[in-house]
Image (cartoon, rainbow, N blue to C red):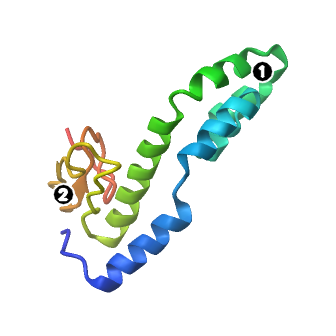
Amino acid sequence: MATPSTPEQQAYFYQQYHMEKRDEVVGVLLAFFLGSFGAHHFYLHRYGLGILYICFSWTGIPGLIGVVEALFMPQRVRAYNLGLASAIAGSMGMLPPIWAPYAPQPFVGGICAHCGVGLAPGAHFCSGCGSPTD
C-alpha cells in the first residue's frame, strides 16, 4: 500500500531521479546529429531500436528518420522521465510527486488495486507490482 512519504524518502527519491533522468536538449541533439546510428534510442535505453539503426546506418534511412524524430524527442524524454519517476516511487512504496512542468494533467491516473501504488495516466501495468491495470 502506498503511504505518504517522509522527508527522508523524498530526499532519496529526488537523489535517484536526478541521477537517472534524461535531458530533452541532449535527446534532440543526439537524434539530429547522431540519429543515423540510433544514439537517441540508446540514450533512452531502447537498445533494440538503437542496434537496428546501427545495422541499417549504411543506407542513410535511419539518418533521415533521426532528423524527423528530433522533433518528437522532447515528448519522448518527458515520457521516459515520468516513467522513471513512477518506477522509483513505486519501488519505494510511495506515490510519485506531481510536477507541473512535466504533467499537464495530474500525474496519478489511479491507484493499483493490488498494491496501492499510484498509476500514470494511460498505464497498462503497475510500476510497483507489474500487474495489469485493465
Residue 86, located in which quarter of the rendered image?
Answer: bottom left
The quadrant of the image that shows the N terminus is bottom left
Image mark for residue 114: 2
Q: Residue furthest bottom?
A: 8
Q: Residue at x 29, y 39 (%)?
A: 124
Q: CA distance from mark 2 to mark 1?
A: 43 Å
The relative height of residue 107 versus residue 93 in the rendered view (above or below) is above
Residue 116, located in which quarter of the rendered image?
Answer: bottom left
Q: Residue at x 34, y 85 (%)?
A: 8
Residue 79, located in which quarter of the rendered image?
Answer: top left
Type of the residue with mark 1: Phe
> Mark 1 highlights which residue?
56
In the drawing, does residue 98 fall left or right of residue 48?
Answer: left
The relative height of residue 83 versus residue 63 in the rendered view (above or below) is below
In the drawing, does residue 123 fall left or right of residue 23?
Answer: left
Residue 30 in view = yes
- Element type at marker 2? loop
In-front residue for pair 14/86: 14
